């Protein structure tokens, strides 16, 4: 028998619960409120809420649980498994029905008084389930729509990225520049940390064409794997994996290239990524199709019109770039500093700067911006402005780098990134403090030994700063040297496709002795040009050389 007082109390509680459910679509909040209400009213030891997947797969997900469960509840289960859980935990099962359809289940433990539920308590349970079922279904529908919107937003962003990339590469006549933009776009998504492109010369024979990011085991390879036009994942436990990497280092996504220039793209999965979903793979398939189409049609572009448009843009971009770069390197006593930018045929996004902060401190900076032409030059100009403004504030290099990264991320397109390195030389303290944001590690030469300066963080513009950039500090004293450069130095290729490489550069730095910074920079350029021979320069070459002579220079 339900008394007047208890009925009034129950109805008031149910009314408040119904009003609360109608005010929110927060599934977690609704679920937790249901369990708290039932436990408070019924004084049960434990209870849990489980919802069916809306796509009718029969999968049940545990969305909320309160009380002690031994063993703990599975996150995913079938209805028969749920029944077994209810029996093993000594709980009663109650179905959640919305619009005539079963949407989930409530499991209730025994009351603390170890007695059956009264008539009024049973009425309260049934009423709560009736009120909550609709709210829970609405919340799931809302989350489903929210997820669909998120997927749609990602698809729109991917389409925008494809569109922006297609605009960029349609104005490029050199395949290697297309490969560079493609690789930076892939790396910028964060799912992969290495891109390698192979050209198939003969069946089963693959010739290395281009690489960016995490290093790969081999340049050329013999691989008789039978694959069709579909991309596939090569896991670390595949017997063919050592052809690419000697040790397990992340799954590989293999994308066959089946057009005129047959071959394959190998993407190395970032260690932080566990599983790739189908939509993500579709995006990279689309990227590869865009790469193939562009490379196949380069020869068919309207060269006369394209060249005229490019000349106009390059003229503007070159003016901007020349205005940004320092023209004199005097006045840095006791240091001997020299910097140079050797542009390729197309205006690139390389930038460097050297200037005094005060009597004892000198700032050096170098960057490589994605893309070419006016957009890259304007981004370089913005970067320089940010540097000049931020150094006036009492901030660390780490804090300033984070601010620069966030500004670039918030105000540039998704496919615009910057590899960046900067540091402050304190001649009084004889220290060099620096931050490396995804740039080629510069070299510190000390007593004939070379040390890489790699501490820092991610490339600028990929994502907001969640983890502060790590700041490195080294002793920098008379007799020591710094060599800072962009990848145009080490990636310069000869007609056979062989890069100048890090080893050749390191050998030169180790024997840098009495030469001035300018003379040594000239020698490095001369060696790079000698290596390249008749091959055209495909990327800017930028160098900052810093020498601290044992005798001061003016």
Image (tube, rainbow, N blue to C red):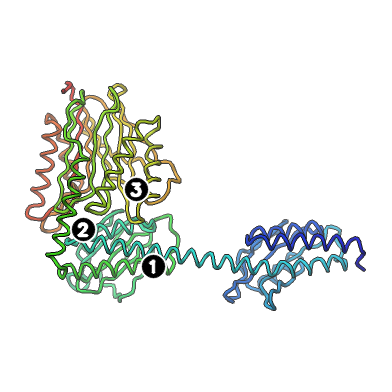
| Circles 2 and 3 in contact, beta carbons < 8 Å | no
Work out whether residue 443 can be spotted.
yes
Q: Earlier in the sequence, mark 3 or mark 1?
A: 1
Give the residue displayed 87% in from the left and 64% down from the top. 7
Name the disc covering residue 459, or none: 3
Q: Earlier in the sequence, mark 2 or mark 1?
A: 2
Q: Residue furthest bottom?
A: 100
Residue that badge 2 annotates: 177
Say if 428 sits above or below 387 in the image. Answer: above
Q: CA distance from mark 3 to mark 1?
A: 23 Å
Give the residue displayed 30% in from the left and 43% down from the top. 383
Name the disc covering residue 281, or none: 1
In the image, 115: left or right of 433?
Answer: right
| Circles 3 and 1 in contact, beta carbons < 8 Å | no
Give the residue displayed 23% in from the left and 40% down from the top. 352
Q: CA distance from mark 2 to mark 1?
A: 24 Å
Quarter where residue 171 is shown: bottom left
Please provide percent x and percent y for residue 264. 26, 68
- Quadrant for the C terminus, please: top left
In the image, 534: left or right of 39?
Answer: left
Q: CA distance from mark 2 to mark 3?
A: 19 Å
Quarter where residue 497 is shown: bottom left
Q: Nearer the viewer, residue 224 or 82?
A: 82
Quarter where residue 19 is shown: bottom right
Please provide percent x and percent y for residue 232. 36, 70
Q: Nearer the viewer, residue 200 or 528?
A: 528
């Amino acid at each position: 028998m339900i008394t007047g007082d208890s009925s009034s109390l129950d109805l008031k509680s149910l009314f408040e619960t119904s009003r609360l459910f109608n005010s929110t679509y927060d599934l977690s909040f609704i679920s937790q409120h249901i369990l708290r209400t039932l436990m408070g009213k019924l004084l049960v030891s434990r209870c849990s809420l489980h919802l069916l997947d809306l796509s009718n797969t029969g999968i049940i997900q545990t969305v909320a649980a309160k009380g002690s469960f031994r063993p703990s509840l599975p996150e995913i289960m079938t209805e028969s498994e749920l029944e077994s859980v209810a029996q093993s935990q000594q709980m009663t099962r109650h179905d959640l029905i919305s619009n005539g359809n079963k949407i989930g289940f409530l499991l209730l433990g025994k009351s603390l008084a170890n007695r059956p539920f009264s008539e009024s308590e049973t009425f309260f349970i049934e009423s709560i389930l009736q009120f909550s079922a609709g709210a829970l279904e609405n919340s799931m529908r809302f989350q489903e729509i929210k997820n669909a919107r998120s997927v749609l937003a990602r698809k729109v962003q991917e389409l925008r990225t494809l569109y922006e990339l297609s605009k960029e590469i349609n104005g490029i006549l050199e395949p290697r520049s297309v490969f560079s933009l493609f690789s930076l776009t892939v790396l910028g998504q964060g799912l992969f940390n290495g891109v390698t492109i192979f050209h198939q010369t003969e069946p089963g024979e693959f010739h290395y064409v281009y690489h960016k990011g995490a290093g790969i085991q081999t340049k050329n390879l013999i691989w008789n794997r039978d694959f069709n036009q579909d991309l596939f994942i090569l896991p670390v436990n595949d017997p063919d994996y050592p052809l690419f990497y000697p040790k397990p280092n992340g799954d590989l996504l293999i994308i066959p290239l089946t057009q005129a220039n047959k071959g394959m793209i190998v993407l190395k999965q970032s260690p932080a990524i566990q599983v790739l979903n189908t939509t993500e793979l579709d995006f990279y398939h689309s990227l590869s199709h865009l790469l193939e189409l562009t490379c196949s049609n380069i020869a068919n572009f309207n060269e006369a019109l394209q060249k005229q448009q490019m000349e106009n843009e390059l003229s503007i971009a070159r003016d901007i770039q020349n205005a940004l770069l320092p023209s004199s390197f005097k006045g840095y006593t006791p240091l001997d500093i020299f910097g140079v930018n050797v542009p390729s045929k197309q205006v690139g996004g390389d930038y460097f700067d050297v200037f005094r902060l005060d009597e004892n401190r000198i700032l050096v900076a170098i960057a490589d911006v994605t893309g070419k032409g006016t957009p890259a030059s304007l981004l370089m100009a913005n970067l320089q402005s940010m540097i000049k403004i931020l150094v006036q504030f009492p901030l660390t290099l780490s804090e300033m780098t984070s601010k620069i990264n966030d500004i670039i991320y918030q105000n540039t397109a998704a496919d615009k990134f910057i590899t960046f390195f900067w540091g402050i030389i304190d001649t009084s303290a004889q220290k060099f403090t620096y931050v490396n944001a995804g740039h080629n590690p510069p070299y510190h030469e000390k007593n004939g030994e070379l040390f890489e300066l790699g501490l820092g963080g991610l490339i600028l513009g990929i994502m907001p700063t969640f983890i502060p950039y790590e700041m490195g500090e080294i002793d920098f004293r008379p007799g020591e040297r710094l060599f800072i450069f962009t990848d145009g130095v080490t990636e310069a290729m000869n007609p056979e496709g062989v890069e100048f490489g890090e080893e050749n550069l390191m050998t030169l730095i180790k024997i840098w002795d009495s030469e001035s910074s300018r003379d040594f920079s000239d020698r490095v350029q001369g060696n790079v040009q000698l290596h390249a021979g008749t091959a055209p320069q495909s990327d800017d070459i930028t160098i900052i050389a810093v020498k601290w002579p044992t005798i001061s220079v003016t």
